[in-house]
Structure formats: structure tokens, C-alpha cells
Image (cartoon, grey):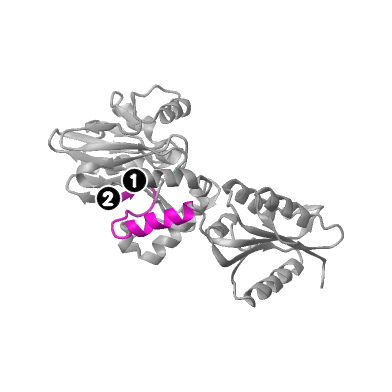
Amino acid sequence: MVIKIRENIYAVGARDPEVRIFHGYATPFGATYNAYLVYDDSSDKWILIDNVKAAFTEQFVTNIEEVIPVERIDYVIQNHIEPDHSGSCPVIFERIPNAPIYCTAGAQRGLKAYYQKDFNCQLVKLGDTLKTGKYTFHFIPAPMVHWPDSMLTYLEEEKILFSNDAFGQHICPDNAFYDDELGYERLMERASDYYANIVLPFGMQVQGLLKQAAPLEIELICPSHGVMLRKHIGDMVEAYGRWSRNEVQDDKVVIVYDSMWGSTAEMAEKIRADFESTGKKVSMHSLREEHYSSVMGDVLEAKFIFVGASTLNNNMMPTVAAFLTYMRGLKPKDRIGMAFGSYGWSGEAVKQAEDILSGLGWTILPQRRQLYRG
Ligand code: FEO
């Protein structure tokens, strides 16, 4: 599917409505791998911005060729080289072997390592531009938003920011290509889930990026995942500011647990009642029902994170261990944690969970641990 964004600017990326796990992250609504094609009619130059996941190369090539033959592409801007944005490179560059790729030094190293091939990379840094005729592409490296090689590209004359992973959402709607078509609530729900699962460890780097982008006049943000932003740009930038500053809600509690015989689940209900009675808002997540990554959207703005772990063979249940391992990697900061759980005869899991919460540098409330109550 090709979407005409402006006269001579097209979205030509790939749609993946069936994907349900994206590098360990649940994507119940699918994903897109966006790429863009820009034509500078003053110089008769075509510019491709980003590639797509390897398995979608055929779809991508078909989309490009609804507009032009691949061989007409004069320049490629590769904002990021994670495989969802570079997997089609080997096929594309078979057909345009000499086309320059504008990318960061990190991207050059990655492309060579991944695809065992030398590409014609033109390395860029902050302040560098590509002038194609009437168009000026400004490069904005954004290391760790969310890989070391990442950058964004701003097309000055059209006031478009090609933001790659930043401001993305994992969703593949049939009839919505822009934020206002998706609706504000849905947009922010998907964007916060995405931020929590992809960008959360890199708050300082996000703040640096927001500072770099602040002077830009932006009418449209074209991310590499999800819908384009034209109506809610300010809302999204404001939310990224809040999330990157680790602003949490003092009255928000997340309880996440799994339970062998129902006793830990009962403890979770009791804790919920205790905290709701103090006026707090509690969201419950049973890891038997939900993927561990789907909890993170709530963790993003919650001050209190309570983890319920039954003991199984002297360990946490694997579902709880997976959640804690995952959350530890995403490094939410300055939370108040508590471990709780029921056990039949040994009960090590609560201490194990507490140690992980404590290792995040959080304030830890006294654990609640009890023998199975039938
Ligand atoms: Fe969408 Fe960092 O890849």
C-alpha cells in the first residue's frame, strides 16, 4: 500500500498486521515498518528514507515500484539499522549498488557487520545536511533513541520530521494512516505502550533529542512504526517530555502476579483492596492471562509496583521471573516496590523478587509472604 503524503512524497513501507511478538514485545495489533520516498522535482532526484524488515522486502519493492523503478532512487537516508529498518537493504542495493547511503558511523559499522558487504556510506553528524536541489535534509543523530546508530531526518522545506523509532506506535490499522484518523486515546495508548517497551531506559537521551528538535517547525512527523502525526504533535512531544523526565502518578499502583493455587492471587486482591481504600488507583495484571510486556504501559506512569510470586521448586514461577527480567532491562526509576507471595513449604520466591526490585534502586515496602491458605 502506498500513501501519498504530499505532492511527490510517499509512504512506501510495509504492513505486518499478523505479528504478535516483536523482539520480545507483544504486538496484539500488529506493526508497520514505515519507509518514505521523496522526489525533488527541481533536480529530478529520488530519495528513499529507510528500509523494512527482510521478510517484507517483496511488499516494499512492490510499493516503491508503484511510484518509480527501484533503479531511479538516487540517495538513501538510513536513519537506523535495526533489522526491522534495514533487512531489505541487500535486495535494494543489488539494484542501486552505487547509491550513497546517508547514515551515522554506527549505522555504517552495523550494515557492514550484518550484511557482510561494503555499502557506499556517506557519514553524517549533527548539523550536516543533504541538499538535493530545492530540498534540504537535516540530520539529527539521536544515539540510544533507541540504538547507538539512530538518527532522525528533518526535511526543512516541507517541515517534515522523519523520526524513525521515536514517536512510533505498534499498530497496523486498516483505515488510519494519521493520528487524527486513529483518534487521540488510541494513539496515546499505543504510543505509551511503545515508549514503555522500547524507549524507557533512555530518558536522558530522549530529553537531548527533544532539545535538538525544539527549534524545528514541524507540520508532520513520519515515524518508522504506526501512524503519522499531524494533529497531536504537541501532545506527543509533551508526553515524551513527561515520560523521559520519569514523571509518575503518586496514586497509581500496578499489581502484577502469577499464582499456582490461587493463594497468591488472593493476596493480590487483598493488596488491591488495601490500596484502593486509601484512594489509590490500582491496575491488576495476571501473568497467566497477559504477556509480560503488556504490563509495561501501566508501569510507565505508576509510582507503586507490587510483584506477586508463588514459589515453584525453590524459585519464582517462570512467568514472574520473565516479567522481572524484562522490567529490569527497561530500568524504570524511583518507584516504590513490594514483593509478595504464597508458598507451600519453602517460599524463596518473594525474596528473589524483592532482590530484583531492590536492585533497581527502588524504595521497598515490607514484603508480604504467607503459607498457602486454601
Ligand atoms: Fe524499529 Fe530500533 O527498530
Q: Nearer the viewer, residue 149 or 99?
A: 149
**How many marks are shown on the rendered structure?**
2
Q: Residue furthest bottom?
A: 277
Visible residue check, residue 12: no
Q: Indicate the quadrant where residue 55 lies.
A: top left
Q: CA distance from mark 2 to mark 1?
A: 9 Å
Instruction: Give how far across and how far down residue 149 sits, in percent.
Output: 43, 34
Instruction: Give how far across and how far down residue 161 sits, in percent.
Output: 30, 46
Element carrying mark 2 = loop
Q: Nearer the viewer, residue 156 or 50?
A: 156
Element carrying mark 1 = helix
Visible residue check, residue 191: yes
* Placement of 373 over or under 211, stated as above or below: below
Q: What amino acid is labelled 1 in the image?
A: Ala
Seen at 82% across and 71% down, the residue is 373
Residue to which mark 1 is pinned: 213
Mark 2 in CB contact with mark 1 (< 8 angstroms)? yes
Q: Indicate the quadrant where residue 276 lies.
A: bottom right
> Is residue 315 found left or right of 331 in the rendered image?
right
* Placement of 265 over or under 104, stated as above or below: below
Instruction: Give how far across and how far down residue 136 sits, in percent.
Output: 22, 37
Q: What amino acid is labelled 2 in the image?
A: Ile
Q: Which segment did they paint magenta?
A: 221-244
Instruction: Give how far across and how far down residue 247 sits, in percent.
Output: 51, 58
Seen at 57% across and 65% down, the residue is 250
Residue to which mark 2 is pinned: 218
Seen at 59% across and 61% down, the residue is 303
